[in-house]
Amino acid sequence: MIVNALVAAAGSGTRLGFDTPKAFVQLAGRTLLERSLDALADSERIDRAVVLVSPDMREAAEGLVADPINRASWAGMSVSVALGGGERMDSVFAGLEELRRRGVTGSSLVAIHDAARCLVPPALIREVVDKAAEGVERQAWWGAVPVMPVTDTIKIVDEATSGPADGETLLEQTPNRDTLRAAQTPQVCELDALYEANLAYMRTTEISSAHASRQAGNQPLQLATDDASLLEMSGKRVVAVNGDLMAMKITTPLDYRIAEMLLNSDSKDVNRGLCDGTPR
Ligand code: C5P
């Protein structure tokens, strides 16, 4: 089965505190985007990768893709660049459209990966791709996603709009932690199923890149922040795979420092059974 990857790299990543958009920040001499592509290529499961970037970073991305050293290290995987959109889901949808323009449809797989999860182990990518392929072949599930158990107690909060606590943030509910997982990437889905789920989501929420309905304030919107959630909404089964701490998303300066330290340490050691997603 052909496996395409969409690498979401169009975010600004302002929380990281660099002037450069996050995917183009250097981490120990290599950008987050290059490191993500290294992992995808090293997994030996990805036939083609499309990198989704903002218009101002297109040239920089094309430069990385054309770099002879990168071309050599990604030799088994074709890499191209396309424009993303205003939110992550707009970027992914632009990538799905790009694949369709190239005639990629049918029961091929698409692995959506956040460029910000640049230390993802190739072995995890292999595992998620293989799990998704198994389900699609048996028509038993339509995607596979790496997940991690959560260690904090998670609260659902709401802002009080009247009464003695007016304006305060109140704790509303505490979901059972045993059933909670934090989703990572790559999220690997059957291409057509994910495309249809995107269309259905956009139809029901009337979301466009401009998010006109949210601006008009006439609809409570929950933005889809990952891809599996769209399949879940459209009633398609998605299977969980034990994730890996190394697939952490680099968002804050602290994440960046941790990633640097992981690269400087023996990451195999760091990762030896202590950091995988086995619930405990
Ligand atoms: O902002 P956050 O870290 O959650 O973004 C996750 C990934 O989605 C990042 O790799 C980011 O570059 C990407 N993204 C995107 N298009 C956007 C916003 C985020 O490709 N409009």
Image (tube, grey):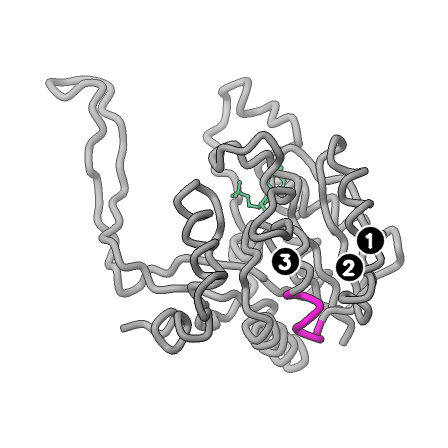
Name the side, left or right, on which 165 lies relative to 2. left
Mark 1 or mark 3, which is nearer the start of the sequence? 3
User: Is residue 140 visible to the viewer in this orientation of the structure?
Assistant: no
On the rendered image, what quadrant is the N terminus found in? bottom right
Rendered-image quarter of ligand 1: top right
Name the side, left or right, on which 223 lies relative to 200. left
Provide residue 260's location: percent of width, then percent of height: 47, 54
Q: Which residues are magenta?
A: 39-45
Kind of residue at badge 1: Asp
Residue at x 34% of width, y 73% of height = 274
Q: Tell me the mark number nearer the camera, choosing from 3 and 2.
A: 2
Provide residue 153's location: percent of width, then percent of height: 22, 53
The numbered disc on residue 67 is 1
Residue at x 43% of width, y 41% of height = 252
- Indicate the secondary structure of the residue bearing disc 1: loop
Residue that badge 3 annotates: 36
Residue that badge 2 annotates: 70
Question: Does the beta carbon at disc 1 come under 8 Å from ligand 1?
Answer: no
Q: In the figure, residue 78 lies in which quadrant?
A: bottom right
